[in-house]
Structures are given as C-alpha cells and as structure tokens.
Image (cartoon, helix red, strand yellow):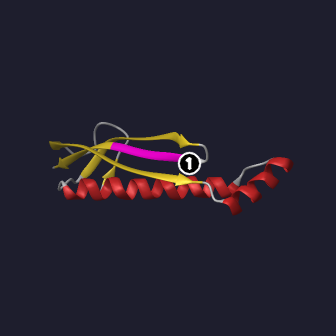
Amino acid sequence: MKIITADTVPDMEITQTLGMVRGNVVRARFFGRDILAGLRMIVGGEIVEYTKLMAEAREQALDRMIKHAEGLGADAIVTTRFTTSMVMQGAAEILVTGTAVKLR
C-alpha cells in the first residue's frame, strides 16, 4: 500500500477514487510515565516517554487507515494528513485521513 501526502502518485495514474479513509486512536497518559516526565521537566530536554507514546499512537492510527483502505480494495492512499487534538485532560486523539485510490 502506497501512502502519499501529495494528490498524485509519481509515475502512476489514478484510475478510480474510492473515497476518504481514516484511522484514529485516543491515548491517555500513564501515571508511571507522568512521574518520569515530571522529573524531565525539572531538568529540561525532550520528554521521551511522551514522544514514544505519540509515535505508537500515530502508527496505530496509520495501521487502521490502511486496513480501511484495503477493505475498499485500494492500491494507494493520497492526500494523507495527520491531526492531533486533546480529548480531555491527559488524553489526545491522533487522526489520520486520506483518499483511497486505484492505480494503473
């Protein structure tokens, strides 16, 4: 499955647009990670616990979008975009959207 942020696929022709596909996940902070993150905030620097949490959430949302596109019989997903929003204190949603297409 090709995942493209542009609206075309290099050296390929889009023969059919199958529709919008999406994948999302809501992740909450974990108490143990909050303790480590709090310590890191005191000394400064990257909060790797949250970086890892968000990276895992993005991958899970991407996997869900790919499954959605595969269910439609897509060869690729174009115009792929990620968004993040706070759902509640300590929880964020990662949403990835795109357009499923057939290629030639």
Per the image, label 1 sits on a secondary structure element best described as strand
The answer to whether 30 appears left or right of 25 in the picture is: right
Q: How many marks?
A: 1
Q: Quadrant of residue 18?
A: top left
Task: Give the answer, above or below, for where 15 lies relative to 74.
Answer: above
Given the current orientation, which residue lies at the most extreme bottom position?
Answer: 32
- Residue at image coords 21%, 46%: 101
Q: Identify the main secondary structure in magenta.
A: strand
| Magenta-drawn stretch contains 93 | yes
* Residue 72 point in image, percent of width and height: 18, 54
- What amino acid is labelled 1 in the image? Ala
* Residue 52 point in image, percent of width and height: 61, 58
Q: Quadrant of the N terminus?
A: bottom left
Q: Which residues are magenta?
A: 91-97
Tell me the residue that label 1 is attached to.
91
* Residue 4 point in image, percent of width and height: 35, 45
The answer to whether 20 appears left or right of 104 in the picture is: right
